[in-house]
Amino acid sequence: PCYRVTLSLCVGGELETTTLAEMPFGSLMPSWLHSFALVEDFVVVVEMPCRYNFPAIMGLGGLLLPEASHICMDWDPHSPTRVHVVSLREPGCSAVHELPPFFFFHIAQAGLRRETGSGAVL
């Protein structure tokens, strides 16, 4: 399973969608992705260890399976927060940075600083 970065364009009255990148999940269950950053030629996706609990979504939490730790999601304090950085110029070029687990709600601002000899810093 993976997250996908896609580009959708209207061509001749038809919507055409192209997958630019695929980012593998950090675990078997997808994380709650509420916000992302788009900076010039990069998209940045922050994958928190806040994962959907599908049995809880279907109303089975607490009946046959454990209840979710928060309504329909589980927090995994032992998993890192993963920051995916995907180049939009070179779709096959991406990086994943792992950080200690943290929760966030929105990405309010992002910026790009180009440094001579070392590439770009987001």
Image (cartoon, helix red, strand yellow):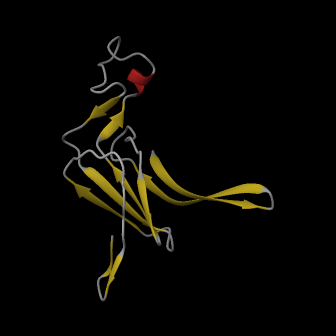
Residue 115, x across and y down, in percent: 30, 84
Is residue 103 shown left or right of residue 112? left
Q: Quadrant of the C terminus?
A: bottom left
> Of 95 and 121, which appears nearest the observer?
121
Q: Residue at x 36, y 54 (%)?
A: 107
Number of numbered labels in the structure image:
0
Q: Residue at x 42, y 16 (%)?
A: 59
Point out the residue furthest to the bottom here.
116
Point out the residue furthest to the front here.
108
Is residue 91 shown left or right of residue 25? right
Residue 112, x across and y down, in percent: 36, 73
Please identify the quarter of the rendering in which residue 11 is found: bottom right
Please identify the quarter of the rendering in which residue 120 is found: bottom left
The correct choice, above or below, for 63 with respect to 44 in the image is above
Q: Quadrant of the N terminus?
A: top left
Residue 64, x across and y down, in percent: 35, 13
Is residue 35 shown left or right of residue 89? left
Residue 18, x across and y down, in percent: 62, 59
The correct choice, above or below, for 51 with respect to 23 in the image is above
Point out the residue furthest to the top here.
63
Q: Residue at x 32, y 57 (%)?
A: 83
